[in-house]
Image: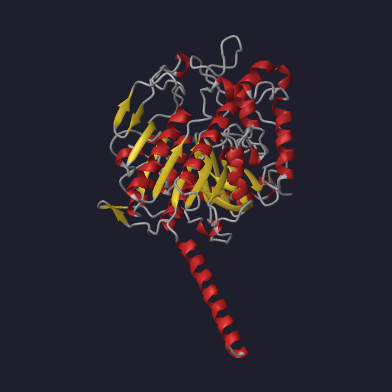
Amino acid sequence: MNCKFKYFLTALVILALSFQNLCADEIRNNVKPNIILIMVDDMGFSDIGCYGGEVQTPNLDQMANEGMRFTQFYNNAKCTTTRASILTGLYPRGTNANKHLRRNMITLGEAMKLCGYSTSLCGKWHLGRDEINHPFHRGFDSFYGLLDGACNFFNPAQPDPKYKGGRVRVFGKDDQIIKEFPDDFYTTDAFTDHAIKAIHSAEAAKKPFFVHVTYTAPHYPLHAKPEDIAKYRGKFKMGWDKLREQRWERQQAMGLVTDAWSFSEGDSRGYPWETADHDFEDHRMAVYAAMIDSVDQNIGRILKTLKDTGHDKDTLVLFLSDNGGCAEEPGGRDPQKRVPGPVNDYVAVGPSWGWAQNTPFRRYKSWLHEGGITSPLIAWWPEQIQPATINRNVGHIIDILPTFMELGGGQYPASFEGNPLLPVEGKSMVPLFRGKKRKTHEQLCWQWSGNRAIRQGNWKLVWDKLNAQKEWELYDLSKDRCEVNNLAADQPTRVAAMTNDWFEWAKKVELKIKKKSP
């Protein structure tokens, strides 16, 4: 073999290998993945380990180390509105949770079925239960979970205490109601059991799967297994102020925050640690931590199932929270009357812990400062998402539906089952998963129970219903992510323009609010 022919043959082999690798990359980039969307309920921005928390979350931390963490991903600050947007790719219309899903909207379940997926929802629904609003009738092949907003973790059929209204919550499987539960029942485990069954069912049918797992934890009532609670007793006697400082230090050390983040101080609804019952406060935060710990254990079960079925490389898993930590406190905080943990009581963490859970941000669930609307978001997709990356682009839960449809090879339809659809308002996040840029939202808007906000670029305008001055607040998030320096007095023209834009949006989404009385 002469030298020229040898070199030619070598070049030909190299070219063939390069073409093969190029084709392999193209195949990987266009693969139709399985998708698991995991959402927890009322968990704060900084509660899990990879976002600065002290709760033991090895499985979520592994997902973060092998995937991508977002720092500016937004929810809608409340259970129902967040769920409506995730399912439709739209802002919620009106204020009635039972009317957030309409025939002129397509749900994630319906959208993914159009893309050829097996679909399942395991966990909390909270968007009504008639035919229009029921998950089993809106695109999910199987449903198991809570149609209501919250329930007893050990026995969902047990009525709420009188101070919470005494309701019996509604639990179901497909289109049937479940009223009896085994003695060893725990919602977090049960939801995971059914998610795993859904994966195996899709595997048997040889279809890609979309599984939406919506844990009720760590939403109150604070219920956890004794062995999980024991891990955390005594670990929260530093108090909420010290906890926030420790989390802030960890967030800085891991590179999660930047110089544009300033540590916010105080909350108007909080109370001093010095005046609190330290043992009781430690106890209820320990139960809360145990609930998150249990979620992480169950996510480990899901990841193991993916590995056992050979789907650990072709499955995208997203993890997020529906809103910030919760400051509600039904039943009060009297240690003589409240016992966190067991089946027969109904305790919550209250405003001071609820605020600390969103370190370093201001406020919490139902409020529209960053603490109420910023969600931890982990995206895990081996060989597709570059490991250990932090993404600082802005995203919103309305982006999830168009993202999944693009990955599933589908296009958002103009109509569905004879009904013209509202145009989708979200934007695909697929470029962000690839480490690329995408066209950003011109603006994002929020409202809940008298609180309002609008973000345009790096400017954010906030109306806090507890603001004593009854005025809009303005922040430059590029320099002040934690909303410490109110610039409204220095930027009256911008405030007026953004205020007008918010009211135009409110009209579009059918909010009946008089502009003259914000």
Q: Position of residue 452 (x, y in %)?
A: 54, 40
Residue 196 higher or lower than 6, as above or below: above
Q: Position of residue 359 (x, y in %)?
A: 66, 36
In this rendering, position of residue 378 left or right of residue 167: right
Q: By what rule are the colours in the image chosen?
A: secondary structure
In depth, the one of 31 and 104 nearer the eye is 31
Instruction: Find residue 86 and report its image quarter.
Output: top left
Which residue is at a point 42% across and 38% down the rendered structure image? 195
Instruction: Find residue 368 and report its image quarter.
Output: top right
Q: Position of residue 495 (x, y in %)?
A: 60, 49
Instruction: Find residue 360 and report its image quarter.
Output: top right
Residue 31 higher or lower than 54, as above or below: below
In this rendering, position of residue 65 left or right of residue 146: right
In this rendering, position of residue 214 left or right of residue 110: right
Q: Position of residue 174 (x, y in %)?
A: 31, 35
In depth, the one of 419 and 19 nearer the eye is 19
Q: Residue furthest top?
A: 336
In depth, the one of 383 and 171 nearer the eye is 383
Q: Does residue 366 appear anywhere in the picture?
A: no
